[in-house]
Amino acid sequence: MRILLSSYSYAPAVGGLETVSSLLAREWQKLGHEVRVVTETPAPANTPEECTAPVFRRPGFCALTRHLAWCDVFFQNNLSLRLAAAWPLCPRPWVTAHQTWLIHPGTRPVWYHSLKYASLRLGRSVAISRAISAALPVAASVIPNPYDATLFNATSTNAAPVRDIVFVGRLVSDKGAFLLVEALSLLHRNGAPHTATIVGAGPEEPRLRDAVQAAGLATHVNFTGSLPPGEVLAVLRRHSLLVVPSLWPEPFGIVALEGLAAGCRVVVSDGGGLPEVVGDVGRVFARADGADGLASAVREALAGPAPDAEACARHLARFQPSLIARDYLKVFEGLLA
């Protein structure tokens, strides 16, 4: 099968969408399929490409038409009208995986949302979580995202964690790092001086550092900046608890799977797809309860037993890249049949 994978953002950019696109391309090639990637992400300036599939960056309209003519299936890992612009001239079976909300919660629809809604009628939709599926205007299969099980393998455990809590994510207000600082302050005032590491970078970092200083937590909170996946794994292994305190409803949350695979306890907020991601092996707190709710969840998670290793392994098995890639192939084969 010839698969044209459209991913608006792709390596060397870093994030959930980029990770999933790379994993799927790799797995489909392992299974003997031909894959091409089209993306808006420019080529790395100083480092060589490390992609198994050929990547065509910022293709023009004519190039998109040629790629569509080549493929058997056009797969968009998140809807991009720009990368689908040539489809009417060269229609192919079209599958869109919805990695986020078509209209972000709390925002009003604008004119181009009508185009997106219309485009969904032309192909098959897949949602990465039941939460995303419920918000779509069309029927959608639910196929969760994979995590990099080769790197974040489920046999790795934290034999001797050296710090208590770790946060991994972009330092923007929606990700909830400020809420974590508030919860840490509450715990300190109640005689639980937990340590924490914040992994990530973003525009809110200066304000977040100021908040840590103002709360008297400077000696208890460490900032690492953004780290490559291998170093993120090393950091996770040195901590007991991963906290994903997102204030907005996360569509999925691959980092929670990575934390479980690295042997961490995991606490997540109750929005979007995060509760689905951790299932019965993680702990969920209500965003409406704010810092008090997060502090209680952290206290209970650290005081209680670590998740059962066999239960975690069973849970993580559903998110293996090879299984997710085959689930998508079944969708493609159904369309071609």
Image (cartoon, rainbow, N blue to C red):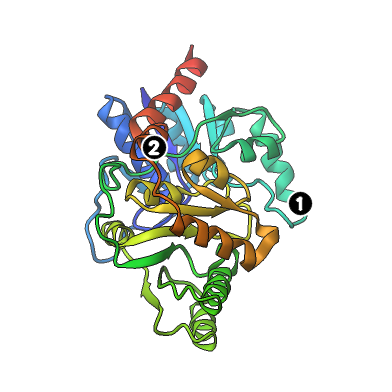
Disc 2 element: helix
Disc 1 element: loop
Instruction: Tell me residue 64's x, y (percent).
Output: 46, 40
- Tell me if mark 2 has few (under 14), some (14-19) or many (20+) residues whose alpha carbon lies within 10 angstroms of its own: many
Under mark 1, the amino acid is: Pro
Q: Is residue 124 left or right of residue 111?
A: left
Q: Residue shown at 40%/73% (left/top)?
A: 195
Vertical position of residue 31 compared to residue 287: above or below: above
Instruction: Tell me residue 112's x, y (percent).
Output: 70, 49
Q: Which mark is residue 175?
A: none
Under mark 2, the amino acid is: Leu
Q: Residue shown at 55%/75% (left/top)?
A: 190
- Of 163 and 23, nearer the camera is 163
Q: Is residue 291 left or right of residue 14?
A: right
> Real-space Cα distance between discs 2 and 1?
36 Å
Q: Earlier in the sequence, mark 2 or mark 1?
A: 1
Q: Which mark is residue 316?
A: 2
- Of 218 and 92, nearer the camera is 218
Instruction: Tell me residue 65's x, y (percent).
Output: 47, 36
Q: Quadrant of the N terminus?
A: top left
Contact check, label 2 and label 1, Cβ < 8 Å: no
Q: Is residue 18 left or right of residue 274?
A: left
Instruction: Tell me residue 235's x, y (percent).
Output: 31, 63
Residue 58 makes an appearance in the image:
no
Q: Residue shown at 41%/43% (left/top)?
A: 20
Residue 127 image-quadrant placement: top right
- Tell me if mark 1 has few (under 14), some (14-19) or many (20+) residues whose alpha carbon lies within 10 angstroms of its own: few
Q: Is residue 1 left or right of residue 269?
A: left
Q: Which residue is mark 1?
A: 109
